Amino acid sequence: MLLQQTLASEFRDALRPLVRRLNNERTMSLGKTGVLARLSERGRATASELATAERITPQAITIAVRELDDQGLVKRTHDDVDRRRIWIELTDEGHRRLEEERSAVHAWLDEALTDRLTDEDRAVLLAAIPVLRKIASEHIVD
């Protein structure tokens, strides 16, 4: 148990500055970027679907969507059958802005991986990616 607690603490402490540095490259919040990414990957969605997918409150998604709409990054349209349902879709400008966000973060990370790591370091990191995905997944691993 002590080893597991130490591992968790060391892992958290190693990730914290990396996450902070990646977030410094962003020009919009991680939540708004997540909304744009979700819409880009899966197409239109309702606010409740977005809130569930992004694990944020309905109130927070309402504010985020309103701000994204004000910036022309998403558009809201009523459902043809149920006029109470509102679909949120990514606009062309939203696609462009999402790629801009991704490019900024990718540029810094690519430079850091190239300049600061050896070939062996990169191989270790590449091998760790499936393990990191397991940690982030919702599924219980045996």
Image (cartoon, rainbow, N blue to C red):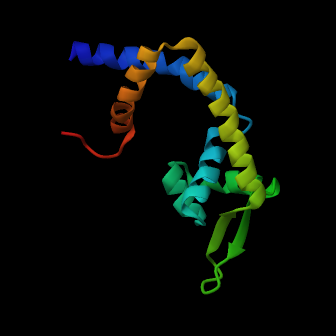
**Residue in the picture at 59% in, 47% down:** 34
Image quadrant holding the C terminus, namely top left
63 or 94, nearer to the observer: 94
Above or below, 114 relative to 102: above
Q: Quadrant of residue 102?
A: top right
21 lies left or right of 130: right
Q: Residue at x 60, y 14 (%)?
A: 115
Q: Residue furthest left?
A: 142
| Residue at the limit of the structure toward the front, as seen here | 119
Q: 110 or 18, which lies in front?
A: 110
Q: Please report the residue visible at 61 percent of the width from the left and 44 percent of the height from the top.
A: 31
Image location of residue 119, percent across then percent down: 46, 16
Q: Position of residue 70 (x, y in %)?
A: 81, 56
Q: Residue at x 45, y 21 (%)?
A: 122
Quick one: quadrant of the N terminus? top left
Up/down of 105 relative to 98, above or below? above
Q: Residue 22: name its quadrant.
A: top right
Q: Quadrant of residue 114?
A: top right
Question: Could you say where residue 49 lies in the image, as x and y percent from the top left?
Answer: 52, 62
Residue 2 placed where, x, y %? 23, 13
Tally of numbered tags: 0
Q: Is residue 36 above or below residue 85?
A: above
